[in-house]
Amino acid sequence: MSKRSVTEITATSGNQGEPRKTPRGESKQPENATNDEMGEFEDAWEDELESDEEVVDSEARKDEDGMDIDDEVMPPIEESEEQPPAPDVFIPGVHKLGQDEILEPDDSVDNLGEQRQRFPATAYIVAGTQADTAKNNEISVYKMSSLHKTQRENDSDDEEDDDDDALDEDPLLEYRSVPHLGGVNRIRAQPLPASSPLPPVSQPYYVASWSETGKVHIWDVRPLIEALDVPGYAVDKARTHTPAFTINSHGRAEGFAMDWASSGEANPSALRLLTGDIHSKIYLTTTTPSGFNALSQPFTSHTSSVEDIQWSPVEPTVFASCSADQSVQVWDVRAKGRQSVAGIDRAHESDVNVISWNRSSTYLLLSGGDEGGIKVWDLRNIKKRGTTAPDPTPVAAFHWHKASITSIEWHPTEDSIFAASGADDQVTLWDLAVEQDDEETGAMDATPENGRDVPPQLLFVHQGQKDVKEVHWHPQIPGMVISTALDGFNVFKTISV
């Protein structure tokens, strides 16, 4: 199976497919997309679901006075009323602060942050291309703004809902790019806590790219973000067009597996990056006060290509990996010999393409295979290295997708919900807490359409994209999903979480 990852949602708002591009500085509207055994999960929602309309939530829009547009009732403006002056905008490199002057934030334009529920939404993603010529590739930071709730055709004109959330306005897509030698196999953004803004302007914001040349490059994309947000911002090409660091540990072997970890909210700048290649080796790169440090000794328990890596959400020294050798391995960087400490030797019938570690129920791990299967594992049951115990049975297994699973990810806060994508051009949303009632089972047709049983845990199937390669939950907008494919990006929201 050929895999390429091209997109990753940044913490403020990565396998194949080249994103659509517009001339730099212009905007473009993204194209619209048009019985397994289960363990017991608690249903936190008790089957109370929101409408399946595709929506994207955001915080309330602000007017120039900083008021919530959705909540304000505007009185008639008297001609004699004096309007407050517009605040001065400070542009770095253009303006200078005078003596005793300080910068004050304008809260009316800051609509980012966690738990954004109102429209219009704004999201940032970083993506990489796979051009036909190595020198024609790019890394791009995209800003998606003016994302509104889609208006249904059957909405009544006389409805009393005059909420601006229902406006069907054109979204905006802007981007800034830097050149990248070689196709981008996968790209990952530096992690930040969901409630945290970007670091100060003076500090870098890193993304890492796996190049088909066998190099892993680390880039500071903070200037590209600033260029999208600050009119007239001049990008320092010396800072952005050259990698901040290049990992040469893999030689000429390319790879796909990559994941960042940080030491937490107390010190998010202390970063660690794992990278795995097609020759079964995994390397660790860390940060020090003087910069990045690529460790020379690899982790070597896999016998084939390393396809995906995930750091533990709670144990800073523990990570999991999956491979074309059909196994899932769990590692501790402190272990001697750089060997895995536990694993599932035959997790799938073929290559294990992707994994995802649950951030809430941290003993749960998802895996997606080349045969199209999705499995949920209880890590408390996996066997330790050196024992002869049999492989555990998955907590749940699903075989809905009819082609390779290309991406899988747990919801960032709800421990029973996950999203998956497949080479069958489907993005699916699942909830393990949903169980089918006996009454509903009796009322259903014994022979579903096309003879396929629909698992009750399958909440939604999103279609319309070609060659879907990656799907991510937005870390700050509840229920928002971004997927990438050969023909562009899709942004949608379907459930209340």
Image (spheres, grey):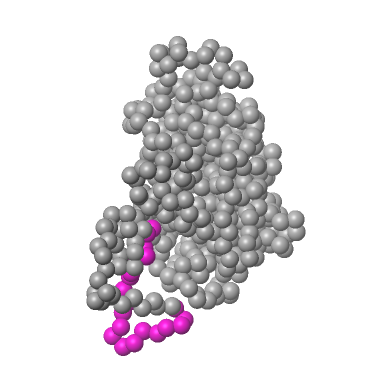
Q: Residue at x 41, y 36 (%)?
A: 51
Q: Is residue 32 left or right of residue 433?
A: right
Secondary structure mostly taken by the magenta-highlighted segment of the chain:
loop
133 vs 273, nearest the viewer: 133
Q: Give residue 167's position: percent from left, percent from top.
A: 43, 51
Q: Give residue 303's position: percent from left, percent from top.
A: 65, 38
Residue 105 lies in the magenta stretch? yes
Relative height, residue 396 to residue 120 (above, below) = above
Q: Residue at x 47, y 41 (%)?
A: 152
Q: Residue at x 49, y 28 (%)?
A: 458
32 vs 396, nearest the viewer: 32
Q: Is residue 364 left or right of residue 327?
A: left
Relative height, residue 39 to residue 291 (above, below) = above
Q: Residue at x 66, y 39 (%)?
A: 304
Relative height, residue 372 to residue 471 (above, below) = above
The span shown in magenta is 92-112
Q: Looking at the figure, which quarter contains the N terminus? A: top right
299 vs 54, nearest the viewer: 54
137 vs 266, nearest the viewer: 137
Residue 392 visible in rendering: no
Residue 7 visible in rendering: yes
Q: Give residue 434's position: percent from left, percent from top.
A: 41, 26
Q: Give residue 481's position: percent from left, percent from top.
A: 48, 44
Please identify the quarter of the rendering in which residue 133 is found. Answer: bottom right
| Count of residue discs | 0
Residue pushed farthest bottom?
99
Q: Looking at the figure, which quarter contains the C terminus? A: top left
Residue 344 lies in the magenta stretch? no
